[in-house]
Image: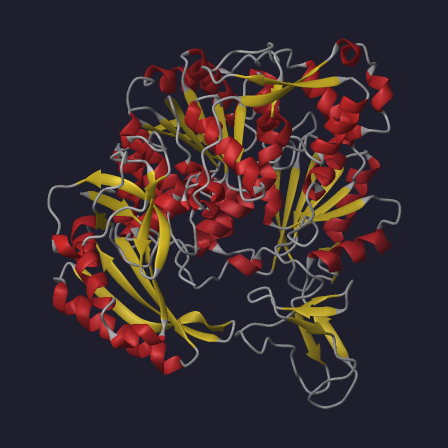
Amino acid sequence: MLRVAVPSPLRRAFDYLPSNAPGAVLPLPGMRVVVPFGRGERVGMVVAHVDHTHVPRQRLKRLSRVLDGEPLLDAQSLAFLRWASDYFHHPIGDVVLGTLPAALRAGKPLPAAGESRWRLTESGLAVASEQFRRAPRQAAVWELLRRRPDGASRLDLASLEGDWRSALTAMAAKGWTEEFQTRVGAIVQQAAGEASLIPSDEQLHAIETVYAARDGFQSFVLDGVTGSGKTEVYLALIERTIALGRQAMVLIPEIGLTPQIVERLRDRLSVPMAVLHSGLSDGERLQAWTAARDGRAAVVVGTRSAVFAPLARPGLFVVDEEHDASFKQQEGFRYSARDLTIVRARQCGVPVLLGSATPSLESLNNVASGRYQGLRLSRRAQGALVPQVEVLDLRGQPFEEGISQKLANAMVRCLAEDEQVLLFVNRRGYAPILICHGCGWQADCSRCDAHMVYHRASERLRCHHCAAERAVPEVCPECGEGDLRALGLGTQRVVDALAERFPDARIERVDRDSTRRKGALQRVLDGIHSGDINILVGTQMLAKGHHFPNVTLVGILDADGGLFGADFRAAERMAQLLVQVAGRAGRGQHPGRVLIQTHHPDHPLLRVLVREGYRHFGEAALTERQQAALPPFSCLALLRAEAPQRDRAMEFLEEARACAVRLGDRSVQALGPVPAPMERRAGRFRAQLLLQSDERGPLHGLLMPWLEELETLKSGRRVRWSLDVDPQEML
């Protein structure tokens, strides 16, 4: 009998009999099959051969057909997916099939072994680079192919920004490029890349320490100040891993960081790479997934979902900006890519390196307890100095559109020296509140417990939680007066104000609205590096790993928003954000300066960060967490429920709590249920129940039987509910 993972809400695999059709083969674990399911058929994957089943044999159905001639996933990959399904208590069928590219989920065949590659012809090699002055995309393709004498793959070309297909077609029409087929083989070193920098003593120690563990599992935390050269450590270790004939995987938190890390890897290594993120087409994702699986890609770079990509010869795992909350999936299969990377490295028997200038408290605690080995980079690379940080007290001080006079004067001096300025505002739009000055009416979302954000450029009100939007009213809907005023700061408002104050400066903003179009973020980053942009205004998108050598002044316009959060992780997240944003200053030859505007200059978080740094903050925060029995000194599972009626969500959670108390013991506490901090969202009322335990064993021992009972509750059929193991957001 065959145990098959089939996508469904049920938290189990299903047993089937082999096909009895003439010539039918017995599929191996890891092979896809089509099975009868319900009233139709579905694509599933065989996960095991079994001798016993709880279903009477006469009720077992037979496979309809086998889709693969060999396993798509090996035993190690299947074991990893089973572990992830069991730990996060998500249906095995959704986990196994959900991590495959769309074409494979739909039952389409795996692409044939081999791939198309492109190279320059003799006439293409003879073309002078000046001929591409008006064709930047062709110039990028030409430069890539020039450095790939053995040919560039679709993966290599897909890592370029812009429409590389049209550029390649135009060049082929001129006889400058040609396509050819190559057979799948091992990783082959191509043209030599750029020479590596001479590492500092601290960098060399980190490189040698991790490399010494190359033949076994160990977790390392690379704790380096911003600008200390963590990426150089990654590159050196990846280079050595490839030299051993193994593959390396690099996880990054945001799509926006993909081009720069891919460019650094390409410049240094000149080997095939697979890039995996949500911005790819289905075809591009399939090509990248297949190249990782076959071993053609020496390096796999991607966001959190890339952790599931199969590797032929894993040798090293790297998680950059490991503290970032983006590594936790918040919908559907709620997994932590950082934590799964550590589990996968352990199963593969290879080292894993977690890098950050602001390590998570969980990682700091693991280093302190000896579970992880800490590596420290205490100095900035190439002699750059740590920026000077100053807290500006806004109490009683005049400031215009969020900018104090002291910050404005500093900007004037910076621009006069032909240096660049970065201003951080963690709100997009023009203003977070639109209010009537006459009666106090506010533009609230009708479906969420939230204000609608005013977007001045389009004269629209938008809810950033449910995406509802409407036109800005001409008069107050409540009193009929026309005195509507925008309160608060958003990136658009700051940019408009700066344009009036600095009319000769080139100003750009970076937020989710301004970077929706493909290539928009890269265009702004290119403008920063070329010096065409003088002032950059942005949200936390700018805080993650970007290197701006000529930015010497960073202004944090409003630090108060994150100082008083409801989530117990709010202080940690705010500290990380402030340090990361501040770290964009002074990374080049000129010293940097950071000005933090606040109405609470005596706040303990700000005092510790400015005077003693993030490490001391982490130590103090861990002490507080231990006293409060909060993670990492306890384990959590959060049951969320939502329904159109408030009482239905609470009724289900009350029954769930009673089940937990009956099934568990005193080592697991059930806290709640309570309404979510934002109770109403997208027209539905939300509530939550928290399970807390000092140990993982008792908590996970309770979860499986608990979930089985929850699935039988009638009240559960009237709500949407989900379980989040190790939640990172309590909202």
**Left or right: where 331 falls relative to 345:** right
**Left or right: where 523 falls relative to 327:** right
What is the quadrant of the C terminus in the image? bottom left
Q: Is residue 55 visible?
A: no
**Left or right: where 287 falls relative to 691:** right
Q: Residue at x 40, y 56 (%)?
A: 332
Image coordinates for residue 450, horizontal then vertical, percent: 56, 72
Q: Above or below — where is 50 with respect to 371?
A: below
**Which of the 4 quarters of the picture holds residue 389?**
top right
What is the quadrant of the N terminus in the image? top left
Q: Residue at x 41, y 70 (%)?
A: 676
Residue at the front extreme? 22
Q: Above or below — where is 116 with respect to 226?
A: above
Q: Is residue 576 visible?
A: yes
Image coordinates for residue 598, horizontal then vertical, percent: 60, 57
Image coordinates for residue 494, horizontal then vertical, percent: 74, 56
**Which of the 4 quarters of the picture holds residue 348?**
top left
Q: Residue at x 43, y 69 (%)?
A: 677
Image coordinates for residue 63, horizontal then vertical, percent: 28, 46
> Toward the viewer: 12 or 135?
12
> Toward the viewer: 288 or 531?
288
